[in-house]
Image (spheres, rainbow, N blue to C red):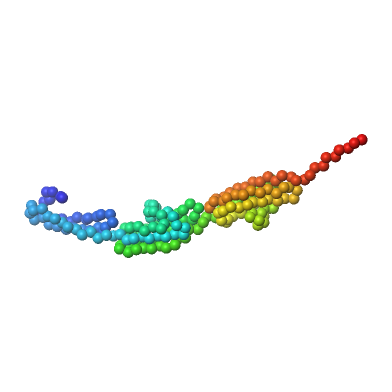
Amino acid sequence: VIPSLPYGNYTAEITCRGYSPRTAAWEIRDATPQLVKVDMTSNQGVLEVTSKPSGVEVLLNETILGRTPLKEQVEEGKYSLKLRKDGYTEVTRTVTVRRSQTTTLRNLTLEIKPCSLVISSVPAGAKIYVNNKQYDDTPTELKGLAPGTYVIRLEKTGYDPATRTVNLLAGTRFEVALSLDSNTGGVDIVTQP
């Protein structure tokens, strides 16, 4: 209710979240109250997003919208859509949502961030075996590994082998330093006159 308007012509811009703006016009000719009725039209569409893996956080213009699988009412417009999850590379897309339509993005795939394993030994120059596969001698860095469990074994002539099991998490750089124990035997010589 807008009281005490002088006689004349008026316009007003009517806005409401989730609806297209509308302009209303009316004329006041006398003191009789007037009803100005405006039909609002929804400006929302539906955004559907699925991903591999599921449970990925969905951001629309840097605002968290939810997790995949996602189905949300969104105002029409052009948006920056981002999917993120710890241990995975982010996926970014530009998406346009249209009024009264469903915009679907299916099976957006997030890649697992690779791991690296830095292996050193005392003394240096030991042969490296990771899950029974031989690599360069120590020290070295193995890059591009998938997350998971790895068994590291170091061998060097004159030393006992050393073994360690590590669990690599996605996107991490893990350092392993092992000391090798000498296995050269000693001789005790006992003499009798």
Picture residue at 68% right of the left edge, 48% below the top: 162
Q: Position of residue 186 (x, y in %)?
A: 80, 42
Picture residue at 30% right of the left edge, 63% below the top: 100
Location of residue 94 with respect to 124 vertically, above or below? below
**Horizontal side of residue 29 vs 132, given as left or right:** left
Q: Position of residue 171 (x, y in %)?
A: 53, 52
**Horizontal side of residue 27 vs 72, given as left or right:** left
Q: Please state which of residues 116 and 29 is positioned toward the viewer in this rendering.
A: 116
Which image quadrant for residue 136? bottom right
Q: Position of residue 43 (x, y in %)?
A: 28, 60
**Horizontal side of residue 142 vs 26, given as left or right:** right
Residue 125 in view in this figure: no
Picture residue at 63% right of the left edge, 52% below the top: 151
Residue lying farthest to the right in this orientation: 193
**Horizontal side of residue 17 vs 80, given as left or right:** left
Which image quadrant for residue 10? bottom left
